[in-house]
Amino acid sequence: MAACGRTRLWLLVSLVLVSPATGREAQFRSNHPDHPGEHEANLTGIPITSFKWEHVETPYLVALWVLVCFLCKLVIEANHHVTEYIPESALLICCGFILGGMIWGADKVQTFTLTPRVFFFYLLPQIILDAGYSMPNKLFFTNLGGILVYAIIGTCWNAASLGLSLWGCHKGGAMGKAYLALRCWRGETRSCSGPWSPSLCPSVPPSIYPSVPLFLRPFVPPFLRPSVSHVLCLRPAGDIEIGLLQYLLFGSLLAAVDPVAVLAVFEQVHVNEVLFIMVFGESLLNDGVTVVLFNVFDAFVTLGGAKINAAEIVKGIISFFVVAFGGSLLGFVFGLLISLLTRCTKKIQIIEPGFIFVLGYLAYLTAEMLSLSAILSITFCGICCQKYMNSNMDESSVQTVKYAIKVFANGSETMIFVFLGISAIDKTIWVWNTGFILLTLLFIMVYRIMGVFFLTWILNRTRLVPIEFIDQIIMSYGGLRGAVAYGLAVMLDETKIKEKNLMISTTLIVVYFTVIFQGVTLKPLVQWLKVKRASHSELTLIEKLQNRAFEHTLVAIEDISGQIGHNYMRDKWNKFEEKYMSWFLMKPSARKKQDRLFNAFHQLNLKDAMNYVDEGERRGSLEFIRNEGAFIDFKKKFDDEMSEAMPDIMADMSDDHGRAPPKRRDTVPSVSLELHEQSMRGNRAAEDFNSHHLLQQHLYKGRKQHRHRYSRSHFDINKDENEVQEIFQRTMKSRLESFKSGKMGVAPPKTITKHTKKEQQSKMLNGKNRSYLSGDEDFEFSEGDSASGYDASFPTRVAYRAGDGIENPAFMPDVDPSSTMHIPPWLADVELDSVAPSQRAQVRLPWTPGDLRRLSSLRTSVRSSDSFQLTDDRQGDRDELPPPPPPPPRRDGDSV
Amino acid sequence: MGASHPRSEQHQYHELMAKTGFSLEQIKNLHIRFQHLSGNEETIRRKHLSSIPALANNPIKKEIIEAFFDKRNQHENETGSFEEIGFEQFLMVMSHFRPPTLRTKDEEREALRKEKLHFLFNMHDTDSDGIITLEEYRKVVEELLSKSGNIGQEAARAIADAAMLEVASTNAPDMGPDDFYEGITFEHFEQMLQNLELESRMHIRFLDVKTTTMHCGKATM
């Protein structure tokens, strides 16, 4: 851990440097307000440089704080043995304590606290947006009923019970003492009653009595009891009393489970998904309730108890619906807007990921402006645009969004927790009242548990799969409060609520207690109770298939049994969604490939390719491909059996794009294949030597060379995947072949065979061949980069062309010269047939860069013709292009 | 058959309750539905089920209907299929989708789980040999994807193949190039679907109360 230690040291040093510096600067400024002016006046020449701190102060501090928070996280995450037991959020808060201490030490005043404005406007939105955007929609909506019950009834219950109980304690006997003290200390003597006389208030020195927990106080012998005034003397004079409404207001701000805290803690615990979505969904949706409750009680406090009548209460209830549903609806509208916009961002691919951030933020601000629930708004915005946006945008943009949104969310989460810690180190906000604080903590726990159990009991009467007892315990225990509560508390109006500071302190204590204590104990509790954990592995293809079959089964059984259940509803919704929403919100091309199965399939392909490369690396070369892929059994070539085997080989993505008509066939003549085979055999021995090396040099690098170009509007992305994809195709094919051959007793790989033979026989065949196309399309072509990315990389295509060319003379002029020169057509064929990249590399070896360049230009021309052909294809023409050179078909489709 | 016996209806219902675990109300409801589907006959044939309008769009309609006529789903260790089924058989098939109650014991749960998985497995294993072969699997996948519109048959096959390969590679990782993966056995099937926890989701809410659902089933279509 030496490294860690050093890091920490470094961090400390940097912090120490930073914080006093800012303090000193501030002093400096106040001492010499007109200093800058003087400076300018005395200026006799052009200064080479000047120091202008004021000029950059705010952004500089912001950036520094961001940096510091990130460094905190870095340090924390470096200590794995600690984060295993203590959740990161708790550690961040502790970091905040330390930082706050430093600042306090330097400035003697807390310069930096978490202000509601910063929190609600700059830190919170991205976290919620992330939550909405990555929300598992299906899970969420399946459990929406339960979530709503917890979020609405549960939150109201929490607020009401907490407020009323505190108020009751205030009024009533045992608790009354605590509050008696409170009042006395405020200088009110009239309501003081009980054993202690208020008249003692002013003069007696402090004792430790106030720190004795409330429930122990009755046991303190009377002679040790101080007079009430001791308690009072601890506090500055004030003149407030907390009335019922203030208590309710306080209850409402503490009622809501906090999405940030919940997410931070539960993310590390991996409970099962239903439990997670229940707690998390509740924490998101209860914002609507909190906002309403808070506003309503705030208004009530302003109005004063006397003026509250039934009409006001009814208005409050109505405002709940308006705020909650209005907010959700607004978010929904913005979500649709994002979806629609991303339909037409093809030309501005670089900035298309920005839309969700901007519009999401606007959704948030708009809701805030209309005093609707901003959190609900941005949540639903994310939920509703995720699907359409992801399919509308280019894959690279989707990745960008996914990544960027995490960066923002995680970053601001870090900052929130650090600043929660920092805010605590401020003498001015601390008002300690043991009774109030302990009671609040107690009530929060107790009522949360009661609420959860009661509501679950009701829910379980109708739930198909009841929520289990231990899950309920975790749900109750997971009711973490966080920065939202703190933000609301800080927003309280001091003129109306004189005990604002007490409320802030209590809120902070509650936040610390729940985040740190409950956060730390949650994980052991989960383990101890053996709560069902989530299996968080990506679903395999077969699982997805099964899942889908399963869903259909459920719907069918419902249909047959004549029940209208959730499945029925979901089915209807899906149909509707598919028919109208997708039509409206998705690009036609995206609509076609939105299928999840294909994503899984896609993933599988990629994984396969990776494995393949790994394996190749491990063996020191890609030799084995050759062995499997390149040995061609000529006898089999014409076997009909083979044609059966063929189709399976690869999925062809273009199909799912609906593009290619099945009948087109590639026209590679069998002659060339055979030739190739022979030459291959001849060459093999020679080729074997360091083919891997060659591959590196020529196959991979060749492409990369063309990648380094600066352009703000074009970003050549994903080029690497070409390689991966190519290789994948080969492996996948050979794997399938061996699989198949095992089954059929046929010798392995004859892709080639198909080309020559099967032709129109079987469509499946086509699928196979086209797979090249499709694969390529998917990975290689992001819009924008059309020709640039690939230039030197695909000699194959050219070669291919040559093969084609035989049938289709039109292409010959373009292709032939180079390909014949450098690659004998048969070789080319083989390559396309998925043999080893290494071969290609070998083939290419003799080329000079100049040749490469020539090739590339050729290729470009070829490509363009390809696209035409493809389009032709779509119209059902016979395909003359064999597999590979795929123009980005999607775009083609669009443009044509 | 059950329905054809001349016993009193009530008695018969109670017997069915014991056998299938449905409540009396649920059985009554389902019986009404049954009669509705069969047109007040004693038995249901395939054509009755396939004429349910709501099923028309279900891609795996065929498999599901077949499941109703599959003797394996009657828990009597028979294989083969019926030409027509009575109410009792109908109910037995339906009982696969009965949610467990809080009172269900662990062993029962386990048995239920197996039953449910067997039901799914049988849907794929059309020739009742205990193995889902590639051919069988492909067929299901093709049908499953046939209604999605965007996926051609070849693609569906390719997907089925890839999925099969996936199973093969997880279950028999050491397979040599000449080995032949015959197909998915029930054990593999079970293992594969572990993560999905299908068994815990394979429930349908069978209404207790007599409602208009019977009509809804058809009327809303």
Image (cartoon, helix red, strand yellow):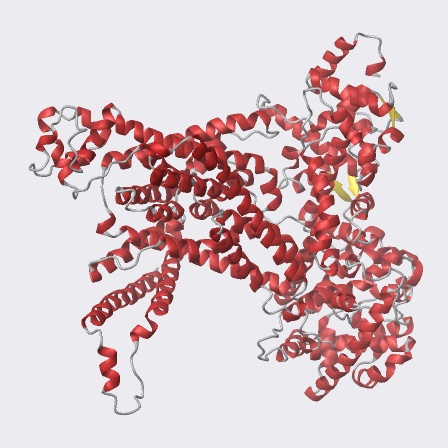
Q: Position of residue A579 (x, y in %)?
A: 75, 49
Q: In this image, A167 relative to A832: left or right?
A: left
Q: Residue A320 versus residue A632: which sits nearer the camera?
A: A320
Give the quarter of the figure containing the C terminus of chain A. bottom right
Vertical order, B187 against B108 (above or below): below
Corner quadrant of residue A74: bottom left
Corner quadrant of residue A161: top left
Q: In this image, A860 relative to A31: left or right?
A: right
Give the quarter of the figure containing the N terminus of chain A. bottom left
Determine if residue B128 is in view: no
Kindly identify the residue that appears in the image at 40 percent across and 51 percent down. A88
Q: Position of residue B216 (x, y in %)?
A: 76, 29
Vertical order, A272 against B105 (above or below): below
Kindly identify the residue that appears in the image at 57 percent across and 76 percent down. A712
Q: Position of residue A349 (x, y in %)?
A: 63, 68
Q: Residue B133 versus residue A772: which sits nearer the camera?
A: A772
Q: Residue A398 versus residue A779: which sits nearer the camera?
A: A398
Kindly identify the residue that appears in the image at 74 percent across and 44 percent down. A575
Determine if residue A244 is in view: yes
Vertical order, A370 against A552 (above or below): below
Q: Position of residue B190 (x, y in %)?
A: 68, 38
